Amino acid sequence: MIRFDYSRPSGVNEAVQAGAGAQVAYLAGGTNLVDLMKENVARPLHVVDINRLPLDAIEEMDGGGLRLGALVTNADTAYDERVQRRYPLLSSAILAGASPQLRNAATNGGNLNQRTRCYYFYDVDTPCNKRNPGEGCGAIGGVNRIHAILGTSDHCIATHPSDMCVALAALNADIHVTGPAGERVIPIGEYHRLPGDEPWRDNTLKTGELVTAIDLPAEDFASHYTYLKLRDRLSYAFALVSVAVAMRIEDGAITEARVALGGVAHKPWRSPSAEELLVGEAPGDAIFATVAGAILEGAQGQGDNDFKIDLARRAIVRALHQAANGTPQSQTDKRIA
Amino acid sequence: MITERAEALHHTAGRESGKRVAATPIATLPLQLTINGEERALQVEPWTTLLDLLREKLDLTGSKKGCDHGQCGACTVLIDGKRINSCLKLAVTLDGAEITTIEGLGQPGNLHQLQAAFIEHDAFQCGYCTPGQICSAQGLINEGHAHSRAEVREQMSGNLCRCGAYTNIADAVIEVLDRRANGEKQE
């Protein structure tokens, strides 16, 4: 484990002041950051422990939305009665990820900011542009079964590992941040980014900015939704491909549908133009296959992960059926209905 | 607000410079914990994990270091009644918390229900994962979200058992869950 200075502010402004310097890391649940410090991947000079900040509540918003404090744990979010009733897609996605122990420690803000699980990123003896800009990418042409098929660059083919964020993408969540320049709100679709030629930047946070809350808009996707996660073992594994669907159906026709993919790109992947194809259509194999093809347009395998393209295609179709039928994927009984 | 300089040893003052900061005495921070019912006033280095504190400083070696990366669950303990991986928790962040380890759940001659059930159901072979399994099972019971065998298996998935005693572990946990559901309480 590396050595570092430690501070424990009690207020957001105090935390942001402490976080303003170079090589500072905010520490919440620690489930990813502590591990990265053990691996010598994260090397902050100063750790700002934000666990005492007053960001640990789930609150009603005017207009019917829900505000999730950044420090509410993933477990407390997933089992919150309001989240379960109004945003079951989010609850389901959280419970599809990690283990109960990790969900009890991991926070909502931390989940947003967790780093990729690319093996090359973790192994400091191999090159990685995300860890050491300009060093090269070990995964391109290397072992890349878990890597991205969409939105990759010549510099990085890592995926974002979160399940929660895939649901947040489908729910059009808003991320509240506070930094040296004040507060701002970042739509989830603009929060994470594609690697491009700056793969070390996972998201669009500016230096010193701290996530304070996640807003869930008041929208009714509680009847037609699913989170379908496919992985190498049934529990406690990262997604090879996951699909979040939020849908509304009136008089047999789809009035709105959102499809977000996990495990396939550097950020939760959405394709608004493909989603648009579903509007006005009755649920069915043909239209779902068309939409899956449209979402995956331009998908490219890296060798070991070529299988993900077909897997994602079939998973999208299946998830759309699950949502349309009102039979969301169980996160306990993993048989796929 | 606590702020401590804890520069030492291995720290490089910046990657670019590549220079090492001269070794200075390591600053420790005060930490108040209640561990298995006993209040402890401790001093820890900020990078000490709860697991290392328990095992190396307090001689509570029941919690095991399997992977040290939050992947195996052998280090599971209860913080304020909730199960977590102690290998991923910096001790200094827990000031004021109540920690329960396997040593606090039961002792020889005074076994916890879960310990007795694990013996009864032959729910271990080498035993290395067992303290974590039992602390995790107590956390599962506290949470109250598992009611069926499938739910127990899913919610015990954060604890690996390389001997493969999963079936019997699930049996042991279910038995205790059922006994609790039927109103039988641990004294």
Image (cartoon, coloured by chain):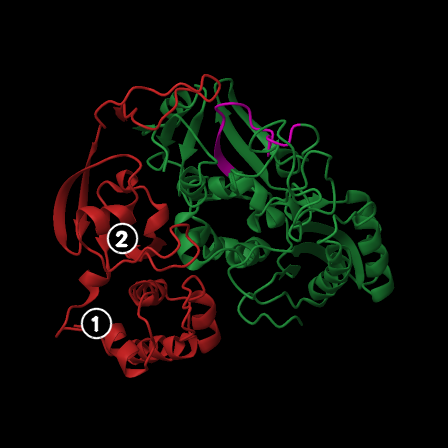
Picture residue at 43% right of the left edge, 47% below the top: A106
Query: For residue A204: magenta?
Result: yes
Q: Earlier in the sequence, mark 1 or mark 2?
A: 2
Residue B135 appears left or right of A224: left
| Location of mark 2 (residue) | B80
Count of marks, rendered view: 2
Q: Say whether residue A113 is visible.
A: yes
- The numbered mark at residue B23 is none
**Tags 1 and 2 touching, CB below 8 Å:** no
Query: For residue A255: magenta?
Result: no
Residue A26 versus residue B24: which sits nearer the camera? Answer: B24
At label 1, which amino acid type do we have?
His
Residue A277 % position (x, y): 84, 51
Q: Callout 1: helix, strand or loop?
A: loop
At label 2, which amino acid type do we have?
Asp
Residue A69 versus residue A336: which sits nearer the camera? Answer: A336
Where residue B137 sits, quadrant-wise, is bottom left
Q: Residue furthest front?
A: A125
Residue A11 % position (x, y): 35, 28
Subunit under mark 2: B
Residue A215 appears left or right of A40: right
Residue A331 versus residue A67: which sits nearer the camera? Answer: A331
Q: Which residues are magenta?
A: A198-213
Q: Which chain is green?
A: A
Picture residue at 71% right of the left edge, 56% below the top: A247
Q: Residues within 10 Å of mark 1 (few under 14, many from 20)?
A: some
| Location of mark 1 (residue) | B112
Residue A258 appears left or right of B125: right
